[in-house]
Amino acid sequence: MTELVATTPGLFPLPDWAKEELSDLKGHQKGDLIGGDEGADIVAAYDRARGEAVDDQHDAGLDRVVEGQLRWDDMLAHPLAVHEGVETRGIVRYYDNNNFYRDPQIRGELDFSGDVAAELDSTAELTDDPLQAVLPGPYSLSDLATDDFYGTDEDLLAGVSEFLAGEVEAFPDHETLFLLEPSLVESPPGDGLDERVPEAISEVAAATDADVVVHTYWGALDEKVYAHLMDAEVEALGFDVVAGDRDDTVYNVTEYGTTSDVALGLVDGQNTRVESPETVHERVEWFTEQVPSQTFDTVYLTSNTELFYLPVSKYREKLETLAAATAQEVEA
């Protein structure tokens, strides 16, 4: 019997009160908000918002609780944007999602930061629910950076993976770790670098005893990228079954196999239409039926993308949908 686990890739929308309050507070604090340098009022506002995010997940009945990443103004690039060795420069658009962020330019070695670990420590104090950590995957983080230190794409990827592994080692106890890798779909690595990606991901995964999920989204992976990704030493791969051509994803899975656990992006993280639990469960069954030779121990039910793009009311409804969809069982 397959276990269904309701969770999310994090990066939640800020409550309206927090947007207004933080906009005002940050307008009075000059300079970049490097990790740990925020004023006391800003810290307090984020603490309150974090508490609401934890309560939202608990009230919805999710099986894993994330921190919410409400401080991540630069989204997936946040671990770089708050690093002392990185200069955050002008506004850029990372992906075709109509959102714009600052460009992180790496100026020095990516040594230990501890910024995300501190967020998770604060979250662990708020809940007894199983904790899930969220990080950008090493390829996506290196893809979003402007490198002015490491020199080559291979050295940059190695430096980023070493940095992320060091950050993970400082995390409090957590059940799962989601590594978000949309760049594997949107900006796939070329020949040579694609062979380095599973090694980089495995290095980060080895830094934790938790189950590691590499979650990809905004479409299907290129066949060659997927074949290499299967070499990564992780418990689960994540697939977007909302956006792009699902048949390409099914082809990859049937041709090259997959992990015994999978994460499925089943609700649309960028569309305000709220799916029903029945629709979500039907999508789980559709996927498992496409690969009848594969037995899944665990299926993580999640949104295909971050939920940052949604109004707060809709994001909360989608949390409830994911949790309710686990009430039924799936034979696999």
Image (cartoon, grey):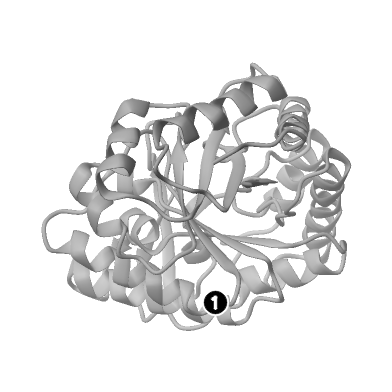
Left/right placement of residue 38 relative to residue 231 reads right
From the viewer's side, name the closer residue of 22 and 260: 260
x 68%, y 50%: residue: 70
Q: Which quarter of the image is occupied by the C terminus?
A: top right
Q: Position of residue 35 (x, y in %)?
A: 62, 69
Mark 1: few/some/many CA within 10 Å (<14, 14-19, 20+): many
Tell me if I can see residue 263 in this picture: yes
Q: Position of residue 37 (x, y in %)?
A: 67, 71
Residues 103 and 126: in front is 126
Q: Is residue 213 above or below residue 313?
A: below
Image quadrant in which you'd find residue 203: bottom left
User: Residue at 80% of width from left, 45% of height from top?
Assistant: 57
Q: x, y (%) of residue 84?
A: 49, 75
Q: Is residue 52 above or below residue 138?
A: above
In the displayed orientation, state which residue is furthest to the top: 273
Q: Which residue is mark 1?
A: 167
**Residue 77: image x %, image y %?**
47, 56
- Quarter of the figure with residue 105: bottom left
Residue lying at 61% horizontally and 40% vertically, measured from the top left: 302
Indicate whether 38 appears above or below 162. Answer: above
Name the amino acid, label 1. Answer: Glu
* Element assignment for label 1: helix
Answer with left or right where residue 109 lies relative to residue 53.
Answer: left
Image quadrant of residue 145? bottom left
